[in-house]
Amino acid sequence: MLLLMLAVAGTAEASGPSADGSPSADGVPEPRLVLALFDGSREAKVRWTRLHRFAEMVLNHLGFHVVYHDLSGGLPPQLLEPDYAAVLTWFDAPVRDSGSYVEWAATVERQSATDPPLRFLVLGESGLARVDFKRPAANAFLARLGVTMQPQPHHFGVWGRVGASDPALLGFEQDFAIADARFPLVQARADAVTHLRLSEPEGAGGTGTDLVVTSSTGAFVHESALLRYDADARTSLWILNPFAFFERTLGGGARPIPDTTTRNGRRLFFAVVNGEGWTTPVPTDRPGDAVRLAGSVVLEHLLEPFPDLPLTLSLVTGDFDPVLGGLFAREGRDIAAAALRLPHVSPASRTRTMPLRWSFFERYSRAEEMAAMERFVNPAPIRERGLVPAAFSNLSEVFLKDKGRLNKERGTALRRYVGEPFALESEIAGSLREVAALAGNDEPVELISWGGDAQVFEAALAQARASGATALGGQGGVYDSAAPSVTNLSALSAQVGEQRQIYDALQGDAAFTNYWTAPIHGLLRLGQVAEATERPRRLKPLQIGFTAYSALRYGSLNAVRTQLEEARSAELAPVPAADYARTVEGFFSVRLFRIGPLQWRVDNRGALQTLRFDTAAGRLDLDPGRCSGVLGRRSANGSLYVALDPAAESPVVALRAASDAEGAEQHLAGFLLDHARWHISGLEADACSARFEVHGHGVGEMLWQVPAPGSYRVEMFGDAAEGADKRFYWDDALAGEDHRLSLALPALDRRAVRVQLSACR
């Protein structure tokens, strides 16, 4: 049931295949779903599987929505929905009922028989027991992968050598090295391609095995060609180039990729200020100094100085309850209320008591919680030896005020506040109401930011969804010189039962500072992460995540301030954190339909506003005459990013061949957005003028391609409440011979205004 539910998510409003699976007159669906099979008897949760930890981020980047199925609960349907592009496995042993599995794998298809065919990709072990290789279905299954296979292992030993290696697919982060192990004997079929072959010299038997094979219907990659663990870097490194591999096996030609990293041609940026430590007193050098709370430092140094950046403040509401939060609860509440009055600060909840080990609360027991707290606060063996637990000696100033406030060290504690029994409704929906009251307006709070280990269970995710808020948190990742692998970057989300947990884009200050110990200025490394995730491919938006604990010491405070200052001057599209979470939700709901040559309709996209076409830059360009609901396009890193108009329900995107003249500048007719800091919607244009709505923070930097060079009158009008015809800004701007009109409109103090560009005379 879950498989079918996820497969058809977001299809209610979309036109697509008919009931029998054949394409309808309204278009052919672009298959974006990948069915990921795992054995729950060996990998108990989706978030623990190799597919999720290593492969899903790459698949998300390439536009694929991964749907997980646990084989320990039975086989998937024999006939999959038309939106499925492939079946993917990464087993480390035969599955429990491999006989039934191979019969299914040999014949599974999707309802629609349109090209490309359903692919079957096997990473690691085949999943078959040795006895099942004798079944006729085994030959059919292996033929889908493009191989024949003998399960009896062969030891190549010191005679082994690499007979063939494809540099386009191998040596991505680590070179392949022959392991001292036994390998199955695999041979590529005549219609398949061998990318890595291990062989023996003539005279030593002449035996060989193909470790990486791709075909038109599937692929096989042996475990030894996937990853290698680097003990020095404490990370796994890709031997296989996962981007090239999945593009080769699942891609092909120009295809639209829903992109969560970009808005209006610019890289997305958001910042989450998490409230842990908000009511912690800042250390002082002299006894008797007035107490100053960390929240006050955050307000003065990290919120008020940056009115041009939308910042999301996520608060632990238990901090402001005197029964739970203690001595500084009321003062902390006043500071938080002042912060939320700032127009660029969006409210969010970090929940009420902030669970630190979420799995414990899935089947909550108050008695077990109190027993665990007692063991943590009064560990008898350590107490008898007269020692202080390391958790307290290192972090007591940050976390511990009394036995009701426990720290997160090594995941030992269960939640920040235990002064009241845990209740899911008050933890999530109740905390959202508390934050809304603190913000002092009638608007609902749109975001929950998960804290603790963020291993959130299904009922908690359902409670967040039922409350009307989106939710964000957990994972994210770091990719820099200290963690030099894309395996350290997480997927967009995790499938949790019938719910979905959206992850942070990047990790925050706790990860960079080892929980505010050393290096205390570690968040400065975020610049490396920003660069590594931008080139050669834009893998992530830029996220700055920090807590009030970073306000307690100068080094961490300065690191956060430095990152915010760099973000305000960079070419980014700043959004509140909830906008990013909604964009990711749109990634999973969107459906794409091919309605003509290089032409697609976009349905059910939610807040997702960008399509990306890889390898298209310089080769393909927008075809405005066949588009609707499109703002413009921009090339970056060899990809073409197409900006969709948020006001368009079902935009149509079309491409055509770019200009063949070498070095020639192609000027398409009409007004086309290149990039913008503000968020633009409702574009209306004629031969010499354009009108659109904008909202955002800071100076309105934008670049347009316009119909002709010359002078353009630029005007800004108020919103409907102020009088839609009330003009409050006007100026003239000059478009050069390159047809480019660059604008820097005055900073907004309103949520939405209208802009008109006109060269009409």
Image (cartoon, rainbow, N blue to C red):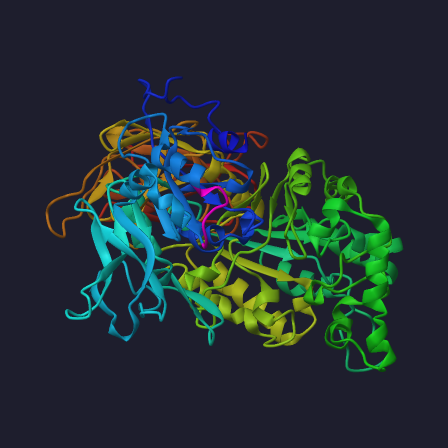
The foreground one among 600 and 155 is 155
**Left or right, 203 with reference to 184:** left
Q: Nearer the viewer, residue 744 or 515?
A: 515
**Which quarter of the picture shows residue 98?**
top left
Answer with left or right where residue 747 lies relative to residue 672.
right
Q: Position of residue 209 (x, y in %)?
A: 25, 59
Does residue 96 belong to the magenta stretch? yes
Does the magenta run of residues contain 565? no
Residue displayed at 58% across by 66% down: 511
Is residue 295 among the parts visible in the rendering?
A: yes
560, 604: nearer the viewer: 604
Q: Is residue 660 left or right of residue 415?
A: left
The span picked out in magenta is 92-98
Residue 552: image x %, image y %? 70, 71
Residue 443 in the image: x percent, y percent? 68, 36
Asked if residue 448 is positioned above or below residue 488 in the image, the reply reads: above
> Split into 4 quadrants, where in the image is the C terminus?
top left
Query: For the point 37% across and 33% down, which residue is it?
Result: 108
For the N terminus, the image quarter is top right
Depth check: give the residue in front, 166 or 289: 166
